[in-house]
Image (cartoon, grey):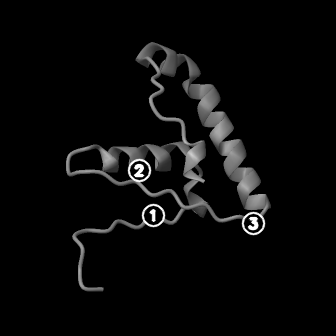
Amino acid sequence: MFETVELGRQLSKERYREEQERLRTELLKIQRRVEEEKLAVVILVGGVDGAGKGDVVNLINEWMDTRSIYTVAFDELTEE
């Protein structure tokens, strides 16, 4: 599955702003299609402290219809 991830690609801020509305609309269409097909999707956001994980999660929640999103945050590792 991870072999399909594209690494090393960059998008300028100007180009991102140009594409933002189209990308948001497309994301919502995909979310609706996933819901209709009754599929589950897991998005795992990880990184070192201060890397912007919270910002990424907040942006995803801002862009998507949160009625079908369940967000869980994990802190330090425990025995469990």
What secondary structure is found at the residue carrying circle 1? loop
Mark 1 and 2 residues: CB-CB less than 8 Å, in contact?
yes
Q: Amino acid at mark 2?
A: Val
Q: Amino acid at mark 3?
A: Lys
What secondary structure is found at the residue carrying circle 2? helix
Q: Quadrant of the N terminus?
A: bottom right
Q: CA distance from mark 3 to mark 2?
A: 22 Å
Q: Could you tell me which residue is drawn at 79 percent across and 61 percent down?
A: 37
Mark 3 and 1 residues: CB-CB less than 8 Å, in contact?
no
* Horizontal side, residue 27 vs residue 50: left or right: right
Mark 1 or mark 2: name the one nearer the start of the chain. 2
Residue named by callout 1: 71
Q: Quadrant of the C terminus?
A: bottom left
Residue named by callout 3: 38
Q: Is residue 20 above or below residue 77?
A: above
The local crowd at label 1, few if under 14, some if 14 to 19, many if 20 or more residues have their Cα within 10 Å, is few
Mark 3 or mark 2: name the one nearer the start of the chain. 3
The local crowd at label 2, few if under 14, some if 14 to 19, many if 20 or more residues have their Cα within 10 Å, is some
Q: Could you tell me which residue is drawn at 42 percent across and 18 percent down?
A: 13
Q: Position of residue 3 (x, y in %)?
A: 57, 46
Q: Is residue 60 above or below residue 21?
A: below
Q: Residue furthest top?
A: 14
* Horizontal side, residue 57 vs residue 66: left or right: left
Residue named by callout 2: 57
Q: Amino acid at mark 1?
A: Thr
Q: Position of residue 52 (x, y in %)?
A: 29, 44
Q: Is residue 19 above or below residue 30?
A: above
